Amino acid sequence: MEAQEYIESGILELYVYGLLSKAENEEVSSMAKNNAEINDEIIAIEKAIIALSSSFSPFHSVANYEKIKEKLELTHTHVIELEPAKNWAQYMGWAAAILLLFGIGFQYSQMDQTNTQGTKSEIEKAKIEKEFNVLKLKNTANEASLAAIRDTKNTVVALGGQAVAPESFAKVYWNQETKVVYIDAAGLPEPPEGMVYQVWALKLNPLTPTSIGFLEKFDVNDQKIFSVNTADEAEAFGITLEPAGGSLTPTMEQLYTLGKV
């Protein structure tokens, strides 16, 4: 093995640290005696250890440290073997550094987990607040609807099922003073996709239908109570099923409910 390959193998550091077997120590010593480059490299490693150890070793007085340093610097004819017991200070320093790095990594991991949990909590909180606000709005709308249909001044008109859907029924709550109209459509089936229920205020003689609105978003209205446009005059009310967007005149073949005031 070439001297440079031997140096780069890392065995010289292990030799200086005192971590080789007796046979390996003898091999390195022999190599150092026969090769100046290897010997110089060992001395350089020893000097680096001396410099490193001086920053944290509390086990030697300054005088003793200087004697050891002087001896190492003056010795070039042979290599001073360092026993493992003499290297505990530096090992402890490295161990402390490794523990510190692990500690920092652990703290960072914990901090990251805490931040992640905090973000999840904020998202969950925002979601709950949103759901609460939606429920609050629904509750307010429901209360307004119930208050309107319970008005004692309402005229209640029952609408019976017609030929296309005999089982259907509905109720109209019409305040003739305020002209406000509410429809209770609990007795109507859900309209097919692309279709909508249209509400008509009717004059009977001659028959004159006036559209007063649609029962929109039928599938999401749990109470099936709808506010439509006001009605100034009406002698009857009817509900037909029309294409989305409504029709100018009622489709009589799709007349679901009808009732006279």
Image (cartoon, helix red, strand yellow):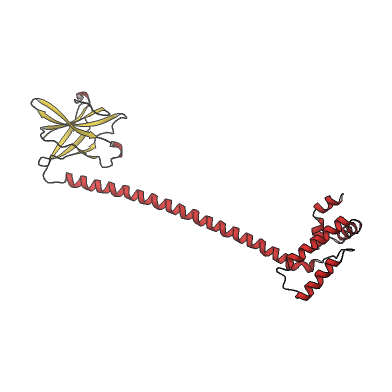
Q: Examine the rendered structure and indicate whether residue 248 appears above or below residue 140.
A: above
Asked whether, in this view, residue 61 is left or right of residue 252, the answer is right
Asked whether, in this view, residue 194 is left or right of residue 177, the answer is right
Q: Examine the rendered structure and indicate whether residue 99 appears above or below residue 251.
A: below
Nearest the camera: 115 or 146?
115
Rendered location of residue 28, percent (x, y)? 87, 58
> Can you say which quadrant of the picture contains the C terminus?
top left
Query: Which residue corresponds to the image point at 79% horizontal and 60% vertical from the top-left?
Result: 45
Asked whether, in this view, residue 174 is left or right of residue 164, the answer is left
Q: Examine the rendered structure and indicate whether residue 111 appears above or below residue 168.
A: below
Rendered location of residue 172, percent (x, y)? 16, 38
Nearest the camera: 220 or 128?
128
Query: Which residue corresponds to the image point at 26% horizontal and 35% vertical from the top-left?
Result: 216
Rendered location of residue 253, percent (x, y)? 21, 23
Q: Examine the rendered structure and indicate whether residue 193 appears above or below residue 45.
A: above
Rendered location of residue 30, percent (x, y)? 90, 58
Query: Which residue corresponds to the image point at 32% horizontal and 47% vertical from the top-left?
Result: 134
